[in-house]
Each structure stands twice: as structure tokens, then as C-alpha cells.
Amino acid sequence: MSLNYRLRSALEDLLETNTHLINIQNDPVRFPKRYSDRGDVEISAFLSACFSYGNVHSIITTLEKLFKPMGASPMDYVMSASKSRLKNDYKSFKHRIHISDDLILLILFLRHIMKEHNSLERYWCFGIDKPNADEPAITYVNGFISNSLSMLYKGIFHNEPRGLYFTHFFPIIGVSCCKKLFLFLRWMIRHDKELDLGLWGFLSPAQLIIPLDVHVARISRFIGLTNRRTTNLKTSLDITHKLREFSPLDPLKYDFPISHQGISEGCRGRFYAPVCASCPLRQVCIMVT
């Protein structure tokens, strides 16, 4: 039995045993799934992805605080809240390195996009005529970052207050693995009733790139999806290319269950019998075999 066959079989077992409806409560995608209006979903998904870093408890706590003032419609709130209300609603907001000024500027930024383009999807496609044939997702992420930084630092928002780490929302692709933006794209492109949102169509699920968090990076090394130890775009592509061998049309169907082996299922990055004994990946994991 070939290693590739064993690895694919283990990943398919993981898909079958991973409990999406339970683990989704430990995932930021639960927030945009609260809404049905397209604008509410786009706004809430983007903001949720922006603050999807750090441990899952802090992410969920931050997002609960973020969306509470927005009530039933994040879109209505973003489009209508005055600056004084924003400052009052988020005066104590903080998530790790980001502060209230960062969130307020993101909200003003989203308001401008919705006024000018009427949807985040149209903004992501703005100015892109010929995406890279091999990895079009990189073209769209690059275009989004470039357009956004021009607007935020040279355009109408250049005088707005922000924290020292605001640019972390718009990282340099290649230097960064752009995990948050590729996560946002996975949510918006993949069609999955239980998990992802599937509202956008300018990419296919086959063209997505895996959002590389610490859990995906570590477990991918353990099971042979990559040998790379650096958390960067090359590693994201290495893992994605391997997953495309197993599922050419939807390689990121494996992303959520792999990630949640670390987030929700207790993978400790070393052999731990109570967890490893029941792990669907145990037959291909170097920590067990």
C-alpha cells in the first residue's frame, strides 16, 4: 500500500469522523453564519477573518464583543454608525496587538468599499483583468492588499488614527502566508452547507490556497503533506498542491478538520495516548508510527 494511498485514506477517515457542527462552535466562521443577508455575511466574515489569530478562546471572546454593538445587521451598523458612536462602542476594544482605532478604521474602510462598489466581492475583483493562470488566488489577494494599502495610506484614510500594527491586516504576500485573507476566501468561495459560506464565484474551490495556521502547519508536517518548517506562502502552496492530488476539485475540504485536530480535538504536537489512540491520522503520523 503506497504512502499516498494511506495518507488519502487517513484524510478521508478524518473527514468522516470530524464533527463539523460541534467544532464550528470553536471556529470564527460561526459568526458570519449567524446572518443570511449578503451584505451582513460579507462584512461579518471579513471582520471575523481579520481577528482570527491567537488562541481560539481569545478569538471567540473578541468577536463576541465586536459584533454585540452591531446587533442584527452588521451591514446597517457599518453603513450608519457615526464616528462618535464607534468610539463609544469600541472604546475598550483590544485583541492582542490590535486596538480600538484599528477596528474603527476597518469599519470606515468597509463603509467606503460598500458605498463605492456595493459589495466586497466587486472590490476584490477591482482592477484584475488577467489573474495568474497557475494560482489565481494569489493575484486576487495581492490586488486586494495593494488597492487597500493605497486607499488607507495614500487615499482618503491617510489621516485616520490607527495602531502600530494595523498593516498586519494587509501583509506582504510571500513574506507572509496571508492566513487571514486565504481563510476569508475559503469561507466565501467554498460551498458547504455545514461549514463555509459559498457566496462568491470569481474563483473555484479548486483554486483556493490553504490558510496556514500553526495547527495545519504542524499536523501537515507530522502526516507528510510537507517537509517545510517555515510558516510562509511556499509552505501553504506545498500543502495545497499535495491536497490537490487527493481532491483536485476541492482540496480545502480537508482544511477545517486538519486544523481542528489541533484546535478542538486535542493534538498536542507530541505523542499523547488518550488523544492519539483515536485520531484518524494515527496510521500516517510520525508522532505515533
Image (tube, helix red, strand yellow):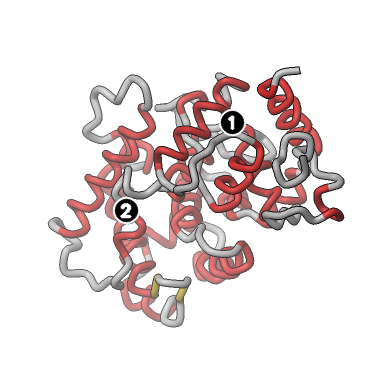
Q: Quadrant of the C terminus?
A: top right
Tell me the distance, in whole angstroms, between the alpha carbons under discs 1 and 2.
26 Å
Secondary structure at numbered mark 2: loop
Q: Which mark is residue 264?
A: none
Which one is closest to the eye, mark 1 or mark 2? 2
Write the residue at 51% across / 57% down.
52
Q: Amino acid at mark 1?
A: His
Residue picked out by circle 1: 191
Write the residue at 68% across / 49% down.
260
Q: Quadrant of the N terminus?
A: top right
Please state if 1 lies on the left or on the right of 31 as rendered: right
Find residue 201 and report its horizontal and vertical position in percent.
45, 27
Q: Nearer the viewer, residue 19 or 272?
A: 272
Q: Earlier in the sequence, mark 1 or mark 2?
A: 2
Residue 221 position (above or below residue 263): above
Q: Amino acid at mark 2?
A: Phe
Residue 89, quarter of the rendered image: bottom left
Find residue 242 and report its horizontal and vertical position in percent.
55, 27
Q: Residues within 10 Å of mark 2 (few under 14, many from 20)?
A: some
Q: Nearer the viewer, residue 198 or 53?
A: 53
Please state if 286 lies on the left or on the right of 120 as rendered: right
Q: Nearer the viewer, residue 16 or 199?
A: 16
Residue 86 position (above or below residue 167): below
Residue picked out by circle 2: 170
Residue 244, quarter of the rendered image: top right
Write the residue at 78% across / 31% down.
13
Q: Residues within 10 Å of mark 1 (few under 14, many from 20)?
A: some
Residue 150 position (above or below residue 197): below
Write the residue at 39% across / 74% down.
99
Total numbered labels: 2
Find residue 114 and report its horizontal and vertical position in percent.
33, 48
Secondary structure at numbered mark 1: loop
